[in-house]
Amino acid sequence: MTGFGTAWMQQIVPEPVTSATVAELDLERLRAQLGRVPRGARAIPARCGDRWPAVVETDPRLPDGTPFPTFYYLSCRRLNAALSTLESEGLMRQLAQRLTTDEQFAAEYAAAHQSYLSAREAVGHVEEIDDYSAGGMPTRVKCLHALVAHSLAAGPGVNPVGDIALAEVTRRGVWPHSGQCVDVDTDNAGANG
Ligand SMILES: [Zn+2]
């Protein structure tokens, strides 16, 4: 990119909200888990086997200026796969149904939405995603991965839907898991593929 191009970009792209504190080893592992280096990674609020990143906390505004509402992104491969299974089994539909009949549950889920927004707001305010959190909050259930990522980052008792999904994968013996999340040795071996 030319100097002229950069100066022009700086005029129209909002300031990125970034701290870039994620260590090189974690970025390398995130690449192995996700197949790419996540943009705007700022912290690792939860870990899985062998201290691999399980959740990556992301800047609310990516380095290129894009607003990014998903503050907590689930990177654990095993958890991602297990939650996809739960989704295909219809757990989201069940939980969405419960939100319409269980007032306490619905209130806790709405509070989880506010908690999510507050945590992200503490990093930086991004107007475009002002009242938008993740996973379908505050009234819908659209992505167990995002909701479990919130549960892992915030701890138990914050996100009731994420907590239920996490309890189910725990019951199934998927979480917590030991050992490396992804076998990177084969990748590093190069000639062995
Ligand atoms: Zn893992």
Image (cartoon, rainbow, N blue to C red):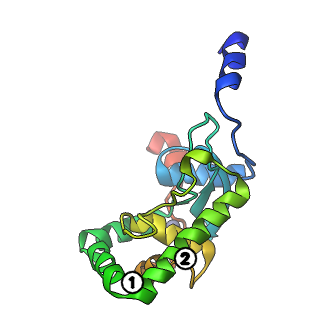
Q: Amino acid at mark 1?
A: Glu
**Is the CB–ligand 1 distance for label 1 below 8 Å?**
no
Residue under numbered circle 2: 111
Look at the numbered disc 1 and give the secondary structure of its residue.
helix
Q: Please state which of the two labelled residues, at mark 2 or mark 1, is closer to the viewer.
A: 2
Split into 4 quadrants, where in the image is the C terminus? top left
Up-down relation of residue 108 to residue 27 (above or below): below
Q: Alpha-carbon neighbours of circle 2 within 10 Å: few (<14), some, or many (≥20)? A: some
Q: Which residue is mark 1?
A: 168
Residue drawn at (32%, 75%) of the image: 96
Task: Say what secondary structure mark 2 lies in.
Answer: helix
Which residue does the image show at 72% across and 60% down from the upper left? 122
Is residue 68 in view from this perspective? no
Given residues 160 and 132, the one toward you in this image is 132
Q: Position of residue 185 (x, y in %)?
A: 53, 54
The residue at 53%/55% (across/down) is: 70
Asked if labels 1 and 2 touch by Cβ distance under 8 angstroms, the answer is no
- Dot placed on the residue nearer the N-terminal end, 2 or 1: 2
